[in-house]
Image: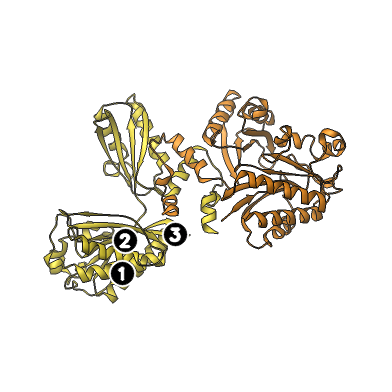
Chain colours: A yellow, B orange
Amino acid sequence: MKLIECVPNFSEGRRQEVVQEIVGAATAVSGIKLLDQSSDASHNRSVVTFVGTPEAVKQAAFNAAEKAAELIDMEKHSGEHPRIGATDVIPLIPISGVSMEECIALARELGEEIGEKLEIPVYLYEDAALSAERKNLAVVRRGEYEGLKEEIGEPERKPDFGPARLHPNAGATAVSARPPLIAYNINLDTADLKIARKIAGSIRGSSGGYPSIKALGVLIEETGTAQVTINVCNYHHVSLARIFETVKSEAGRHGVGISSSEIVGLLPMEALLDAAAFYLRLHDFHPGQVLEKKLAET
Amino acid sequence: MKLIECVPNFSEGRRQEVVQEIVGAATAVSGIKLLDQSSDASHNRSVVTFVGTPEAVKQAAFNAAEKAAELIDMEKHSGEHPRIGATDVIPLIPISGVSMEECIALARELGEEIGEKLEIPVYLYEDAALSAERKNLAVVRRGEYEGLKEEIGEPERKPDFGPARLHPNAGATAVSARPPLIAYNINLDTADLKIARKIAGSIRGSSGGYPSIKALGVLIEETGTAQVTINVCNYHHVSLARIFETVKSEAGRHGVGISSSEIVGLLPMEALLDAAAFYLRLHDFHPGQVLEKKLAET
């Protein structure tokens, strides 16, 4: 079964009745399952997670954006988090049976529909971006709602879809496709925070490690454990097994070992199947050999 | 919905048109879903997996056995894998809404029907066996087709159903009920069959290893690879990771390594999650963290 996850962020984190109406507009679409929602009052922002088939997800995201445009007025919005519109960002994430290419195509269709039918300017970012520069969400959101209002007429700020002026109350929306993110922590058998920090530095992209890895060294006070806390932004580029082995090797250099690791929240089955396949040296394995996956597909 | 999985093994892995006719005889039964089929030329054997309601599965298995008896001649069969008949084994596996007791009753009904209508001697084994000794498939298949042909008249080899003589071309068939089985092969970086045989002997229950493991050493002619071919009869008792590590350790003793391993056919997701958790030393992991599993439950 083709499954896509969608994690839209809305510029409303205080009026729960408004958030519920927006979430309701998405979940009213047949086949959509709500996985999570959380609101932050100081950010004045809500993050919603739902999944479904590509068509259902596109419809649900559109309906939610339409409802947000009806209920949120960006002229009156304030909050700490950067934002350009009522429906600020809509990332689409391929979960199963869907390629990144299909997800990118869907993001562009959704963006075009929001641009034309709702008359909201739309910017594509991350893997769905049409230019290298716009891959970076920070570039798209530069100046936020207020700044974009001034600059949207300039050629370099021209939206990918929709009018070259902000929607009078809903502002603009950024739509993307990206791989699932995995929150993964590795616990060392030491309380030495410096070692965890060195290891984090050796694997993260920002200091010369894997480009799709973000990592920090932290000390877990309760257990006195130094931990490498990791965001895996693209597990197709760097597998959990490779991260584990790199950390193990770097830890060994400091004379320490790995006591355990942990997955925070959810992850796609494939990320763990990849780890099993790596260590068991599986040859010619494909996920369709998993009984539950096979039964779900037939 | 009551669902039983059936994984018959047929003594034909080279003539694909024959395999297709046999599979077609099973899947022609209404409500049967074909999940997998794989043929191995050097074993000269095909493994077919289908699911359905108990009645549909019984009919489909009978039809396939009838077709195999029509198309396969055991007098001309050769292959590396032990076998006693055209339809060598028919295991029935409870998947959902069906108890092991119901599955055992169905296996006995199916065995009786094959014995009486097709005049093929049938042996019940594993959980469906009528004696403790015959729980073990190796006891039922002792001497293979050629040996059984000589001994079938002896009281201890008397079949549970059907005539006390082999079917002239289809030989005999073994029918069982059992928990899901994983067919797992480990390839060594040597062509020395003796080493594969020694390793197989060290892990299998019949020679003092893990009671729920069956294993043989074989030589894969095409690649010149010695292989430990394994049936994991209860992966809750012995995990794939433990098997892999035991084989690796035993192989090391002979100065050889593991080049790859392979899963033949389907396996429950949990068996691979267990392997990932073992190697990544996952702490506090539960299968509900797998997005696809979470989705199936919500």
Residue in the image at 66% along x and 39% along y? B127
For the C terminus of chain B, the image quarter is bottom left
Is residue B89 shown above or below A38? above
How much space separates mark 2 and mark 3, taking CA atoms?
Answer: 15 Å
- Disc 2 crowd rating (10 Å Cα; few below 14, some 14-19, many 20+) is many
Question: Which mark identifies residue A63?
Answer: 1
Residue A51 visible from this viewpoint: yes
Q: Earlier in the sequence, mark 1 or mark 3?
A: 1
Q: Are marks 1 and 3 on the same chain?
A: yes
Q: Quadrant of residue B35?
A: bottom right
Residue A260: percent from the left, percent from the top?
Answer: 37, 32
Q: As shown in the figure, which amino acid type bears the numbered disc 3?
A: Val
Quadrant where the image shows the N terminus of chain B: bottom right
Of the image marks 2 and 3, the number of the one nearer the N terminus: 3
What numbered label is drawn on residue A176? 2
**Residue found at x 28% / y 29%:** A223
Q: Secondary structure at mark 3?
A: loop
Measured as percent of width and height from the top left, residue B143 is found at: 80, 35
Whether label 2 touches label 3, CB < 8 Å: no
Q: Please state which of residues B126 and A297 is positioned toward the viewer in this rendering.
A: B126
**Mark 3 — residue?**
A98
Circle 3 crowding by C-alpha within 10 Å: few under 14, some 14–19, many from 20: some
Q: CA distance from mark 1 to mark 3?
A: 22 Å
Question: Residue at 57% across / 36% down in the picture?
Answer: B259
Q: Earlier in the sequence, mark 2 or mark 1?
A: 1
Q: Nearer the viewer, residue B11 or B35?
A: B35
Contact flag, marks 2 and 1 (Cβ < 8 Å)? no
Mark 1 belongs to which subunit? A
Crowdedness of circle 1 by 10 Å Cα count: few (<14), some, many (20+)?
many
Frontmost of labels 2 and 1 is: 1
The reply, left or right, for residue A151 in relation to residue A234 is left
Q: Chain under label 3?
A: A
